[in-house]
Amino acid sequence: MKKNIIAMNASIMIGLGSILAAPSVYAESISNLEKQKESIQEKRSGVESNISETEKKIDNLQDKQMTAEDQIAALEAKIAESAKKIDAKNAEITQTKKEIEALKEEIKVLKERIAKRNEVLKERALSFQETGGDVNYLEVLFGSSSFGDLVDRVGAVATIAEADRDILKQHELDKKDLEEKQKAVETKLASLEVAKAELLEIQKQQKQQKQEKDALVKKLKQQTKKHEDEKMGLEEEKANLAAQEKAIKSAISLEHQRLAELEAARKKAAAEAKKRAEQEAAQAAAQAASQASQASETKKQSTSSGYSAKSNSSSPSSQSSSNVSQAPAVSSGTFTRPSAGYVSSTMGERWNKQHAGIDIAASGTVPVVAAADGVVSRSYFSSSYGNVVFVTHSIGGQQWTTVYAHLSSRQVGEGAVVAKGQQVGIMGNTGHSFGQHLHFELHKGPWNYSKSNAVNPLDYIPN
């Protein structure tokens, strides 16, 4: 009898021991979740710092861009001014060329006049040579018939001589005028051509400087766009970290709730065990007394009743899931396949970019399910991911993040607790996508913009 009571109490204590051991497991899980929350907070702080640094870079680039654009505007004004000056010089050159054409006509007239004078002077020179020069004039003088005729002849000779001197003088003046006019227009034209060449060189340098500034502005815009994209990615990473922190807090709250429920169950089980022990002890005492008075019935009572503890083994609960058309079967591993279909693209280099997950393609209405138990950290529409769901998981003290992108619709919202195999959306073709498929990512840790925590899903899910 005593042995049976000891065995019964030992059985009760084993059952209580299993219940008492559970809180430590939950406490360890809560500790791991707290560590994950602290890690996410540190990463958020780092991302915020990176956002601040990126904003400074963007501001600096925009300041440089504004300065360069101001310089371009100034250069454009100078180029326009140079163009006006060049146009003015061209007009002067055109006018000078017209003057040269007019001068050519004058020169032609002068040349004809000089040619005629040359003929007259040749005749004079020939006459002078044949008559011996002054003899001609003396013959004219001595051939006079009277004093009056002499006076007339002297006047005529003087007039002829004066006319010869005028012809020679005018001839020299015309030649000098011709030379001066030719030299003047040629000098003016050469000067204009030099000035125009200088202006064209200045304009060429200004245009080259503008091209350099245009190239600088283009480069600054590209750098600004790069940093703006980086900032957008960092802001998205910050939002995801905030959502993951919220999910972790939710998971911690759930663990505390489970721990409280477990503590209540433990107390209830302990009270029931104590009560049952007291009842069994009272029953044993009554049976012992009954054996003393009725020895003949002791064997019968001990055989029929016994004091062995009844073991209440609970049958394992089977997970029931509604059969959704084309939904994949839930596997027994850590992660289950997120959707039916074939793997159309694996993880790795694609289009000169890193493809951080796998693509699973199928036609029709294809359910997408959670790869493991977790909390929905984000559920929103992204320009790249389209309709996307992020789920945060805590498995064996390790944080994981799964991403389900390009969904046609989402069935869960942020903060929702999902079970492994629970539907989270429908496969689609939203965002930056070509054809219906599920883009699935698995990150060992939180999701980040660079996707440095991404691992190959095919190493973890059934093929």
Image (cartoon, rainbow, N blue to C red):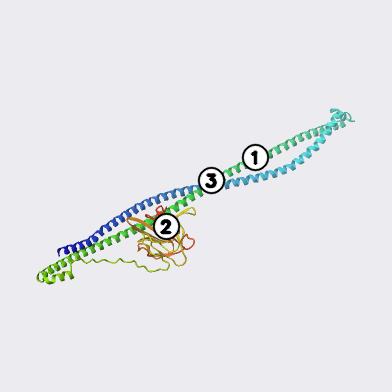
The answer to whether residue 271 is left or right of residue 125 is left
Q: Identify the disc placed on residue 458.
A: 2
| Residue at the image point whose x is 60% and y is 47% from the top | 83
From the image, tell me which residue sits under label 3: 212
Tell me: residue 167, above or below residue 52: above
* Visible residue check, residue 399: yes
| Residue at the image point whose x is 67% and y is 38% from the top | 187
Are the two marked residues, 1 and 3, in contact with CB atoms closer than 8 angstroms? no
Q: Amino acid at mark 1?
A: Ser
Measured in 3D between alpha carbons, the distance from the residue under mark 2 to the one under mark 1, in whole angstroms, is: 81 Å
The answer to whether residue 125 is left or right of residue 448 is right
Coordinates of residue 254 in the picture (x, y in percent): 30, 61
From the image, tell me which residue sits under label 1: 191
The answer to whether residue 312 is left or right of residue 380 is left
Tell me: residue 225, above or below residue 426: above
Which quadrant is the N terminus positioned in? bottom left
Coordinates of residue 174 in the picture (x, y in percent): 75, 37
